[in-house]
Amino acid sequence: MSTVQSEPRPGARRKSPADRAAEIAGAAREIALADGLAGITLRGVAARIGVTPALVSHYQPSMDVLVADTFGAIVSAEIGEVAEELAASPSTVAALGTLIDSLLGPERSPVTALWLDAWSLGRRTPALAVEVGVQMDAWQAFVSGHLRSGVAAGEFTAADPDAVAWQLLGIIDGLNAHAIVRYGHAGSLRGLVRTVAEHELGLAAGVLGSTTRTSTNSSLN
Amino acid sequence: MSTVQSEPRPGARRKSPADRAAEIAGAAREIALADGLAGITLRGVAARIGVTPALVSHYQPSMDVLVADTFGAIVSAEIGEVAEELAASPSTVAALGTLIDSLLGPERSPVTALWLDAWSLGRRTPALAVEVGVQMDAWQAFVSGHLRSGVAAGEFTAADPDAVAWQLLGIIDGLNAHAIVRYGHAGSLRGLVRTVAEHELGLAAGVLGSTTRTSTNSSLN
DNA sequence: GGATTAGTTGATCGTGCGATCAACAAGGTA
DNA sequence: TACCTTGTTGATCGCACGATCAACTAATCC
């Protein structure tokens, strides 16, 4: 909670605009992951890097765009991480299984919390609303791209990969949101999504999942 | 946008505590549905009913609890409405179909937006967090209750109605959230949920749905 | 080394928020 | 009608926020 500055020097170290901009963006990302998008404040970011609020304001046209940019940066970085993780998959089906495993893991909680913030805040700040749309489209394009690959490779079928991608993402987001608010009801999140995906893609039950299945009737395949 | 007051009288009409409390609660509900939970402000509520901010503060221990209470009131009222709507259903299966239809309809948007606000704000305000938990439990109890009825009546099977209820609500919330942020991708929301529900409950495909089915492979049942 | 450029500061403005408290006045009651 | 309870007000405090601008100074250039 105390200030991070080591010396109370009057004139702070002078940095190149690029470095300073990156420093500000980094501080904003850290604050967002720790305190949510609402925690990204002019004074908060300034204090974190030991600088005057005026300097942050000097580098950013407005806090709204900083919030939107920060959200976009975090989410797109996560897409990149997941993409890298899936690159090693031997088949599209295996990649889908890994994707579901990844997206529903507890390590995703911080980012899911940001999605909740963005959905709520985005209704009042246009810049964030645009960014939310962009990132949702990016995720959808990513998933539907994988689906198309699988269809092209003859691994499964899907008449409308775009629609299936939206559905899968909707389910994943909903279950993740529930898991964040009330952890424990998470239960076998992955199992349900796997079952839905298998069904929508015409795959045999169990193909996507390695661990426990979802509840009830899905086990009597 | 202009004030609603008709006369600029110095001393406002004096009301009984019960009436005034109800008036404040009602104003808070209207504001929430119009501008979101973040719009429920001391001055905002006061202005809406033509009263001093101090009076609102006098009736409410803190704004946090007013926000939480308002959210709870709106959500529980909706549960009541849906319950009333389902009461006329001839069978549990029919009730489930109606429930899905109801919950995924566009008229639910205002309330879904409040859920998004609550999920986000609830992470910072304890009172709201508690209320979110209560209302989520209420919805889950409502749905799982119906599932148990159906199981008891032999209409379908479900080894763990509680888990199935959570799953259905998770899917519904996720798809609704997506629909709110990006309307149009909604598409055949109902179809997907119906398919999942039928699968989880061991029902024949198409039993729950009267309209169009979901995408791709679900049509070749 | 002096001049110039540009990163940085300090001070300050205006807004909106929640909350508090003494004082006022409306309405029921004796 | 006089009194007294209490709903209501006006004023005000403290806080946090975004934003702006002239002044300062560190780094660079000639």
Image (cartoon, coloured by chain):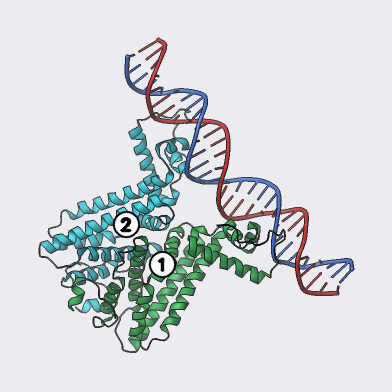
Chain colours: A cyan, B green, C red, D blue
Residue at position x 40%, y 37% from top? Answer: A59
Above or below, B202 against A57 in this view is below
Question: How far apart are the two marked residues, 2 and 1, measured between alpha carbons?
Answer: 27 Å
Above or below, B2 against A18 in this view is below
Query: Where's the C terminus of chain B, which quadrant?
Result: bottom left
Residue nearest the viewer, comparing D15 with B176: B176
Q: Is residue A215 visible?
A: no
The quarter of the displayed image where residue A156 is located: bottom left
Using residue B66 as the reference point, say whether residue A76 is left or right of it: left
Label 1 element class:
helix
The quarter of the displayed image where residue B58 is located: bottom right
Q: Position of residue A221 (x, y in %)?
A: 19, 78
Label 2 element class:
helix
Identify residue type, mark 2: Arg
For mark 2, what is the residue? A108
Using residue B73 as the reference point, say whether residue B101 is left or right of it: left
Q: Position of residue B36 (x, y in %)?
A: 48, 61
Q: Position of residue B70 (x, y in %)?
A: 52, 66
Above or below, C26 against A129 in this view is below
For mark 1, what is the residue? B109
Residue nearest the viewer, comparing B10 with A187: B10
Chain ID at mark 1 = B
Please identify, in this view, whether the residue under mark 2 or under mark 1 is nearer the observer.
1
